[in-house]
Amino acid sequence: MNKRIVPLLLLLAGTLVCARLWAQGPPPPASLQSLANLTEGTWEVDTTFANGERFHQRKNFISALNGHALTTQTKGTVDMETQEFGLRNEGMIVYRAADDTIVFMEADVFGGVTEGTVTIEGKDIYFDYPYQGGKFRDAWIWVNRDEYRYEIRAWQDGEYSQVYLAAPMIRLEATAFEAEYR
C-alpha cells in the first residue's frame, strides 16, 4: 500500500506546483522590475518652476497585475486660484510586448490625458511625452535609493532646449498619506 501512496503523493505535489506557477503567470518583464524602487514609498518634490511658480507634488507608484504594470497616483495643485492640494492625476505604466516598449498614460482632474513612453538607462528613468505642441521629458535621475534628481525638460531634435524644473525628488517615510494609496 505504501508503494502506491508515495508515487501518488509525488504526482499530487507536482500538479500543485505546476498549478501554482500557471496561476502566477509569467514573471514581470525585466524592464518593469527596474522601476521597483519607485513602489517603495511616496515621492515628494516641493520647489518652484524656472518662472517662479510653486511646484509641489507627491507621487505614489503601486505594483499592479502581478508586477506587469504600475498604477500611479499624484497629489498636487487641483485649484490654481486657491492652491488647493489634492488628488490630481491617476495613471498606469505598462510593458507593451508588441514593440518591447514601456508606455504610460495619466489622466488629470482638469480633463487632460498625457500619454508617452518610459526609457530606463541604468538607474535613471525618463518619461517622454507630447504636451501643448512640444515634446517633453520628465527625468528621474538616480542619486540614491531615497532620492532622484527630478527634472522637467523641453526636448527638441534629440536635445534639451529648456529646463523648466530641476529639484530633488525625495522618498517620504511611510505615513498616513501613503496609506491613502493602498
Image (tube, rainbow, N blue to C red):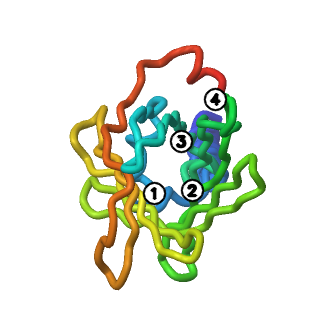
Mark 3 burial class by Cα count in 10 Å: few <14, some 14-19, many 20+? many
- Answer with mark 1 or mark 2, whichever residue precedes in sequence: 1
Mark found first going from the N terminus, 1 or 3: 1
131 in relation to 54, above or below: below
Alpha carbons under labels 4 and 3: distance apart: 19 Å
Tell me if mark 1 has few (under 14), some (14-19) or many (20+) residues whose alpha carbon lies within 10 angstroms of its own: some
Residue name at image x 44 percent, y 32 percent = 44
Position of 71 relative to 146 (above/below): below
The residue at the point 57 percent across, 57 percent down is 93
Residue depth check, mark 4 versus mark 3: number of the one nearer the observer: 4
- Name which residue lies at 24% across and 59% down: 122
- Residue 11: x and y in percent read 61, 49
Separation (CA) of disc 1 from disc 2 = 7 Å
Q: Which residue is mark 2?
A: 68
Provide the residue designation for mark 4: 85
Q: Nearer the viewer, residue 179 or 66?
A: 179
Determine which of the numbered discs, if any, sits on residue 32 in the image.
1
Going from N to C along the chain, the mark reached first, 4 or 3, is 3
Find the distance from the CA under tag 1 to the CA under tag 3. Answer: 12 Å
> Are the residues at dot 1 and dot 2 in contact (C-beta closer than 8 Å)?
yes
Tell me which amino acid carries mark 4: Phe
Q: Judge left or right: residue 104 versus residue 156.
A: right
Viewport quadrant of the C terminus: top right
Q: Earlier in the sequence, mark 4 or mark 2?
A: 2
Mark 4 surroundings within 10 Å by alpha-carbon count, few (fewer than 14), some (14 through 19), many (20 or more): some
Kindly identify which residue carries mark 3: 61
